[in-house]
Image: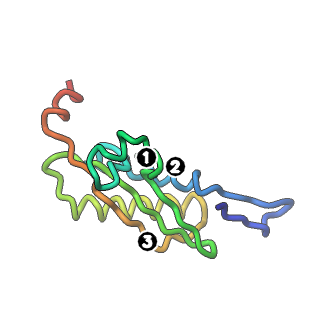
Amino acid sequence: MDVANTNSIGGSLQISTDVIAKIAGMATLEVDGVCDISAGTLGVKGLFSKMGLAALKKPIEVTLSEDVAEITVNVQVQYASKIPALSEKVQENVKSAVQNMTGITVSKVNVMVTGVASPQAQHSEEE
């Protein structure tokens, strides 16, 4: 689904939901404590990924209704992060970035924490 703006001077403007998802993803990764954007395993560990169904769920989902977007972001966080504060910062960052870049109103940003990076993984990435 795309958002169309037919009021542009000299033509029209369409913004794909994939573009909105990309903006949301980049805004999410700007937040300290977010390691990655990941769809996870859909709740049944390993079963769906073995069947090849994990790819069906996108890490960022955008739902548009009457030029208003609802965005769901699935994230992995660093160990020891304060998840409520981190989630609030992700919500603010995503909403601000999408609204500023596209002019589309964002009604809500849902944050799903799908994983926590182990401290060992963080140390190996820093070296």
* 19 horizontally vs 79: left or right: right
Name the residue carrying label 3: 108
Kind of element beneath mark 3: strand
Amino acid type of the residue tagged 3 in the rendering: Lys
With respect to residue 23, does 36 lie above or below?
A: above
In contact (CB < 8 Å): disc 1 and disc 3: no
What residue is rendered at 32% in x and 49% in y?
A: 41
Amino acid type of the residue tagged 2 in the rendering: Lys
Kind of element beneath mark 2: helix
Given this view, does label 1 or label 2 mark the residue nearer the observer?
A: 1
In contact (CB < 8 Å): disc 3 and disc 2: no
The disc placed on residue 53 is: 1
Amino acid type of the residue tagged 1 in the rendering: Leu
Given this view, does label 1 or label 3 mark the residue nearer the observer?
A: 1
* 77 horizontally vs 12: left or right: left
Callout 3 crowding tier (Cα within 10 Å): few <14, some 14–19, many ≥20: some
Q: Earlier in the sequence, mark 1 or mark 3?
A: 1
Quadrant including the C terminus: top left
Q: Quadrant of residue 66?
A: bottom right
Mark 1–mark 2 Cα distance, whole angstroms, equals 22 Å
Residue reaching furthest to the top: 127
Callout 2 crowding tier (Cα within 10 Å): few <14, some 14–19, many ≥20: some
Mark 1–mark 3 Cα distance, whole angstroms, equals 27 Å
Residue 42 versus residue 87: which sits nearer the camera?
42
Kind of element beneath mark 1: loop
What residue is rendered at 45% in x and 54% in y?
A: 60
Name the residue carrying label 2: 22
Q: Earlier in the sequence, mark 1 or mark 2?
A: 2
Quadrant including the N terminus: bottom right
Q: Earlier in the sequence, mark 3 or mark 2?
A: 2
Residue 74 placement (x, y as % from top left): 36, 54
